[in-house]
Image: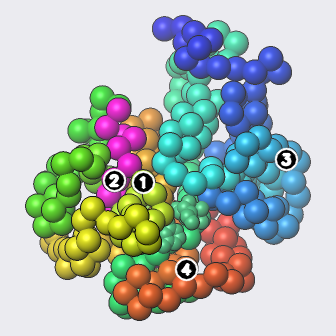
Amino acid sequence: MIFPDSELPINSDGSAFHLHLKPEQITDRIILVGDPGRVDMISGMLDSVRLSMFSREFKTIIGTYKGKDVMALSTGIGSDNIDIVVNELDALANIDYSTRTEKSEHRTLTLVRVGTCGAIQEDLPVGTYLVSEKSVGMDGVLNYYPSVGEVSEADFEQEFCRQTGVLDRWARPYVVSSDSELVERIGKDMHKGVTITAVGFYAPQGRCLRGGLAHPDFNERLRAFRYGRYRITNYEMESSALEGMARMLGHKAMTVCLVVANRYSKSMFTDYHGSMEGLVRTVLDRI
Ligand code: R1P
Ligand code: URA
């Protein structure tokens, strides 16, 4: 199959439409962050940087760290951007840009998201490093792909909807797992849990300002939720789409976040950059 111009847009310099990266530039190890400023921070931690690119919210640096080729790329906020970033990275790796056809050999990327999150449980204070073993996607992105049923966990989804009282008007939640080898290797000594990937920061995470809340008990229900050994630990805004799309396209992905808010104690950690540096260094060492 030949992917037409409108379906796989390629810029006149041969780069991907949004990321502005070329196929020969990308590395197998990729750190994804929300904030473009975090890419600058990572840049200062690498031994060398051979390429920088900035377009919209997508800032990329490519370089080396202790002999490893690595990339750091900002996705901006939200799962809609993950749809763009993962599709373009996958196309750069697995579609021949000159013929616009799928390559015969599959290349597997390792995608590690290093983000910030809000903890839901009392025992996860701000400053905690928390790995998403599973993610519950409230965002709906994966529901647009035909293999959603193959990469998601129907029993968990059903129980989640039952115990939390998900509203009919919301997108249907999907549950996906991070790559277990990555979780073991990178998150070996970190807290682990089930992450809610929300479709917004305020009402979609139960923050009640002047707009109010359609489901005021949702966070209490999340806190009480249990499924086997699993409980819901935190909120962020990208993990489910990343892990789901990676699984669907044959890549390895996981998310680890620094807890910057605790929704139970109502505490917030706005000056978190030192702790974030520690987390990024651990991920660079282990990726
Ligand atoms: C909201 O403040 C943003 O922070 C979290 C959420 O997922 C959302 O993107 O992650 P980042 O710190 O990686 O952006
Ligand atoms: N990011 C989120 O999405 N939620 C929080 O509470 C903190 C960071």
Please state if 22 lies on the left or on the right of 75 as rendered: right
| Residue named by callout 1 | 199
Element on which disc 4 rests: strand
Location of residue 113 in the rendering, given as x and y in whole percent from the top left corner: 56, 59
Residue 2 occupies which quadrant of the picture?
Answer: top right
Instruction: Judge by depth and name the residue closer to the eye, 207 or 102.
Output: 207
Residue 149 picture location, percent across and down = 23, 38
Amino acid type at circle 4 is Val
Q: Is mark 1 within 8 Å of ligand 2?
A: no
Whole-Å distance between the Cαs marked 4 and 2? 21 Å
Cα–Cα span, label 1 and label 4: 18 Å
Labels 4, 3: front one: 4
Residue tagged 2: 138
Q: In the image, residue 287 lies at what x, y percent? A: 61, 62
Residue beneath disc 3: 52
User: Would residue 139 be counted in the magenta stretch?
Assistant: yes
Dot 3 or dot 1, earlier in sequence: 3
Q: Which residues are magenta?
A: 129-144
Between circles 1 and 4, the one closer to the viewer is 1
